[in-house]
Amino acid sequence: MLTLKTWIVQALFIFFTTESVGELLEPCGHIKPESPVVQLGSNFTAVCVLKEKCMDYFHVNANYIFWKTNHVTVPKEQYTVINRTASSVTFTDISLLNIQLTCNIRTFGQIDQNVYGIRIISGLPPEKPKNLSCIVNEGKKMMCQWDPGRETYLETNFTLKSEWATEKFADCKTKRDIPTSCTVDYSPVYFVNIEVWVEAENALGKVTSDHINFDPVDKVKPNPPHNLSVSNSEELSSILKLTWINSSIQSFIRLKYNIQYRTRDASIWSQIPPEDTASSRTSFTVQDLKPFTEYVFRVRCMKEDGKGFWSDWSEEASGITYEDNVASF
Amino acid sequence: MSRREGSLDPQADSTVSLLPHLEAKIRQTHSLARLLTKYAEQLLQEYVQHQGDPFGLPGFSPPRLPVAGLSAPAPGHAGLPAPERLRLDAAALTALPPLLEVVRRHQAELNPRAPRLLRRLEDAARQARALGAAVEAVLAALGTETRGPRPEPAAASAAAATGAGVFPAKVLGLRVCGLYREWVSRTEGDLGQLVPSGPA
C-alpha cells in the first residue's frame, strides 16, 4: 500500500509540473533572451519568468528563483526581482566564451528545481578585413586574399564581392577551413576593370573592407616559359644561346624576363641585367662565359610594365660552351 | 578617370591630366576588343562543332537571314568618321547580348551536354556588354554624345521566329555568333585607329 501511494505521489508530481496531459516536458518558466550572443567585455542581463501554474503548485514566486552558471550558483547581489513572476540576473564584463545559465527554484524548502536553461555565447564583432589583394594565375580563376583581423570566437562568414560597372558577379563565400581567401567562380576577363571587396559578418556585426578596383591583366602570374634549350657556338666559346617558348598569355600582353645562370657546381645564381631582358622575346644570347664550361639556366617572366607577379622559374636547362680555339693550339 | 570601368570624367579639371587617362582607356578598350575577337572566333568554331551536319561541312552556306535588331557592319563603315564608327560599334554591342542569350537558351535545349559552349555564350553576352560600355565611355571622353535611347533589341521576336524548328534555331545561332565576331573585330579595328603609336 505504501509503495502504491509513493508511486501515485510521484506520478502526480510529474503530472502537475506540466500544464496538461501530453505535455510532460513543459517547463515551469522560460528565460529571455533564449539564445544570446554577447560581446566579450560587455554586460548581460537575463530574465526568468515563472508560469502561474507552477507558482501555484509549488507555492513559489520570483523571490524563490536562484541562478546558476555552469552549475555554480550566482551570488544574490546580481539578482533583481522584477515582479511576482520575474527575476533577472546581470553579469558585467563577460569574459567566458560559453556559459550555461540556468534559472532554478527551491521548492518545498529543500528541492532545487530547474526551471529553464540557456547557453550564452560570447565573442567579438569582426574587424574590417585589410590588405585585400588578388592574383590571376594564368589559365585559372582569380583568387583574392585578405587579413581577417582579430579572432572573434564566433562563426564569422567572409564573402568576397566583385562587380564590373555593367554587372555584378556572384558572391564568393569562403570555406570554413580557409576563411581568408576565395577563388571566384568565373573566368577572368582581361581589360575590364573589376571592383572587389570583402564583407565579414557574424552574430555581433557586419563590416566591409576597402574596395579595390583593377584590371585583372595587372594581377597576372603568367605560366613560366617552357621548352628552354641551350645551344653553343663553335665560333665563339664565350657564348651560349637560350631559346624558349612563352606561354599563351603573350598573345595579349608584353612580357619581360629574368634570366639566371650558374656553372654546374656553383650554388649562387647570376642574373642577366634586367634592362637587357625588358621586352617580349623567345631567345637570348648570354655572353662573356668561360670556355668549355657547363652552365645551368632558368628563365621567368612577368608583364612588361611590372604590374602583376613573376611567373615561377622555368625548368632548368644546361649547355656547355665550346672549347677555346686559341687555347687548343 | 574615375575608378569604375566605363566611366571617364569629361569634366576633368585639366585637359592635360585627362589625356593620359583617355589614352589608357583607349588602349585598354582596344586590348579588350582584340581579346574578344579571339574569343569570338573560338565561340564560332565551338558553336559549329556542336550543331552537327550540315553545319561545318565544306561548302555549307546557310541563308544569311536578317537578325531583327542587328545587321552586319555596312560596307561603308570604314569610311565613316571615327566617332560615328564607334557609335555604331557601341549600338551593335548593346544589341548583341539579348541575342546571344536567345542563342544560349536554344542551345541549352539542343545541346544540354555542351556546358563549355553554353558558358562561352553566357560569357560572350557579358563581355559584349562590358565592351559596349567601354566604347561608350571612350566616346563620352572624346566629347562625343552617344545617340539618344536606342530601340529595344528585337531579341524576343528573334526567339519567336525560330521557335518553330531546330534548323532555324541553329541558323540563327550561327548568324548571331558570326555577327558577334564581325562587330568585335570591327570595334578592334576602329579603336586601333585611335590608339597612339608607341609603347603604352
Image (cartoon, grey):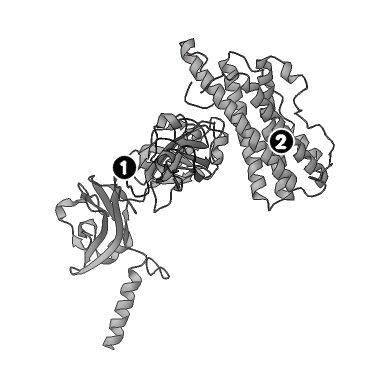
Please say if B200 is above or below A65.
above
The residue beneath circle 2 is B99
- The boundaries of the magenta stretch are B1-14
The label on residue A149 is 1
Q: Position of residue B79 (x, y in %)?
A: 73, 16
Point out the image quarter for the N terminus of chain A.
bottom left
From this viewpoint, is residue B165 visible? no
Point out the image quarter for the C terminus of chain A.
top left
Looking at the image, which residue is at 56% across and 16% down?
A: B141
Q: Position of residue B72 (x, y in %)?
A: 76, 28
Q: Using the image, name the chain to which the residue with label 2 belongs.
A: B
Q: Using the image, name the chain to which the residue with label 1 belongs.
A: A
Q: Amino acid at mark 2?
A: Leu
Residue A234 is left or right of residue B38, and the answer is: left
Q: Position of residue A265 (x, y in %)?
A: 34, 50
Please say if A65 is above or below A319.
below
For marks 2 and 1, give the CA distance.
46 Å
Q: Amino acid at mark 1?
A: Gly
Mark 2 residue element: helix
Tell me if residue B46 is in the magenta stretch.
Answer: no
Q: Nearer the viewer, residue A141 or B192?
A: B192
From this viewpoint, is residue B49 visible? yes
Residue A216 is left or right of residue A94, and the answer is: right
